[in-house]
Image (cartoon, grey):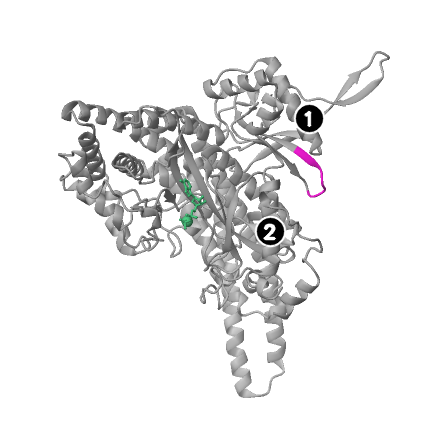
Amino acid sequence: MALESSHHLAGSPLGKETPAQPISEYFGELTFGLGEMRERLPRDAFNELMKTLELGRKLSKETADAIAKAIMDWAVRKGATHFCHWFQPMTGLTAEKHDSFISIQHSNHSELKVIERFTGSMLIQGEPDASSFPSGGMRSTFEARGYTAWDPTSPLFVVESAAGARTLCIPTVFFGYHGQALDNKTPLLRSVQSLSQEACTFLKLLGDVDVKSVMATLGPEQEYFLIDREVAAKRPDLMMTGRTLIGAPTARGQKLEDHYFGSIPTRVITFMEDLERELYRLGIPVKTRHNEVAPSQFEMAPIFESMSIASDHNTLAMETMKRVAARHGFMCLLHEKPFAAINGSGKHCNWSMSNDKGENLLDPGHTPHQNLRFLAVAAVVIRAVHKHSALLASSIMSPGNDLRLGGNEAPPTIISIFLGSMLEKIFETIGRGEAARGSEREIINLGVGHIPDISKDYTDRNRTSPFAFTGNKFEFRAVGASANVSVPMSVLNAAVTDVLAEASTRLKALIAKTGSRDEAVITLVRELISESKNILFSGNNYSAEWREEAKRRNLPIIDSAADAFAIWNDEKATEFLVATKVLSREEIVSRYNVQLERYIKTMEIELDTTVALINEYVVPAVEKQLERTYNVQRDVKNDNLKSALGRRTATLETAFADLLQQCDALKRSVDKLADTHDEAAKVAHIVRECKPAAAKLRAVADRAEQEVADELWTLPKYREMLFHHSVK
Ligand code: ADP
Ligand code: MG
């Protein structure tokens, strides 16, 4: 308390006054989107751009130049000196290559003059020398060139570096010479487009004859840890891998559950306010912030947006979090499992669709028609998640998420859906077949006409479900904190698109057969739900019984990223991606290769860092402790003390012997990795030998930590990393 009030007396911790400006006045001031284009572009140029967006036409050179000019004028006024094509390579991060706006103009007297210049072709297409971005073997070296192309659906923005330099970022897609996607954004954009087309066809059959487009929406809730930067800098594992590879859990852990929704520490709230100000200026509508379950863990959630913008905004927010954290003396950890024995971080992806009138298709409405539409769309999503659960599960797997999923903090990678009792009951009623005769009256009598406001049903939540209906949207909860949302969202969009197409065909036939649209829709809903019964589960997803039950139900169980690769390599499981035009066969194969390669690299870094930590930190600390104990023991006369010290020495010696032995064992299995040339065999070796060896080594290192004097243990401990907020 004393600390808090002294802060207040001294003014804000940063020593500057917080601006009292309303958010609405500066929201998006660093962005240039369609609104600004309309204001600043010549009318013809703007109209041509809109046509381009609608019809996928090519922009004329004149229009492109006019747009580029307007953008440059704006960006230079915002202080930008450079521009970059900003994109999402398959590494899961974002990439950028900067160029300055300057160009040399030759005047009449052959004097050189520097001017700012930015043309339509510089805006629209770039050729970065990006031969080292992963392409999964698609770009052979002689055409090792990737191209970036402006994605006008996402606003341009200006970012400021720590040193104050400002750069105009142009959201782009990244592709190879023959148009193959080399990034995560291209498939996302394709999936959004396919989804819109199939959803429109389906909605028209349902009676929404004037629907023009359907938009997938996404609201990702981002969890993260904040660790003191100076402390983190002393942990080579955090620096190299983003997580702690050794470290004994603290006695306290998250036992008291006192962190969740507790009051936010001063230093953290200062960071959050600063972060939010930056995000607002970048047009990112962050809405909620709170403490999470684990000590030093927090969450931030935006208001949902259209899928492609939400995806750009999430990656941009992740980058901004890291940058702003550094400014506040923090390291922001986005890894799925930075610390053992306490919760890791996820990213719940809230997903829905809305039509061009802005109506949420997963919102039960006020009329029987809206409700019928809601039930039909919900049934399609349920069927889609069931049909494609293997690839959906695979789309969220990574070495980091391997460590988080399946523990008692996050669902195992068995996809199931939780609907809540209200929706479950409605589907049950329909399932009994009573509505098949289906006049509108009968539908109303079934309770379908007046679906209560499910979104208000806060009592009915199942936190253990990987895929839950939460009132007016589905929440994909198994996504990891560091994931690029474009990957699982492309798969989800494609899955729903695939089933929408199938549902439209079936609905047409049913309408022809029954002669009644409402009856046909009810029948379709009944069939879809009955075919997908196995994916519905309202029990405890963390329990061992569920695993057994899931086996009986024939649901895919994918325990690790290594298992998930096989699914990406399975033509049948991925066929719907090709059918929905989200990825070509060649692109799927390349993604499989990239994942394999990245998995191996990530694991190699972790394994090598583990060995280094043991040799450079743990072994010397144990040696010193032993030496100290031997010294004390030597001169002791007291018999009791002598034998007690003898036991202590024995414990230490055993720990030391185990440590050296397990370290050797790990080293040997890592060495074998270098002799394995086939990548799938490398992955198998990592899973079968290296990972268990590393786990054994960690266990003995963590035991040794508890036997060694604190002053001899040079690595910061869990308590120093996790509980600093209570002292600072
Ligand atoms: P809770 O997870 O407790 O339900 P909220 O209702 O606040 O929390 O929603 C969490 C996230 O879901 C927010 O990011 C919110 O914007 C997003 N969300 C709400 N409605 C939709 C929707 N129709 N489509 C996508 N995301 C949505
Ligand atoms: Mg949520």
Which residue occupies the extreme bottom position in the image? 638
Residue 448 in sight from this viewpoint: yes
- Residue 165 lies in the magenta-colored region: yes
Please determine whether, in this image, residue 219 is positioned above or below residue 126: below
Using a 10 Å C-alpha cutoff, classify the residue at mark 2 as few (fewer than 14 neighbours), some (14 to 19) or many (20 or more): few
- Residue 456 lies in the magenta-colored region: no
Residue kind at label 2, given as amino acid type: Glu
Task: Tell me which residue sits at (63%, 17%) in the image.
Answer: 65
User: Horizontal placement of 490 versus 290: left or right?
Assistant: left
| Residue numbers of the magenta segment | 162-167
User: Horizontal placement of 111 versus 225: left or right?
Assistant: right
Please determine whether, in this image, residue 310 is positioned above or below residue 205: below
Q: What is the secondary structure assignment of the residue under circle 2? A: helix
Beta carbon of the mark 1 residue lies under 8 A of ligand 1: no
Going from N to C along the chain, the mark reached first, 2 or 1, is 1
Which residue occupies the extreme top position in the image? 108
Please determine whether, in this image, residue 540 is positioned above or below residue 113: below
Using a 10 Å C-alpha cutoff, classify the residue at mark 1 as few (fewer than 14 neighbours), some (14 to 19) or many (20 or more): some
Q: Position of residue 415 (x, y in %)?
A: 32, 44
Where residue 622 is drawn, which disc sits there? none
Question: Magenta region, mostly helix, strand or loop?
Answer: loop
Quarter placement of the N terminus = bottom right
Where residue 73 is drawn, which disc sits there? 1
Residue 120 in sight from this viewpoint: no
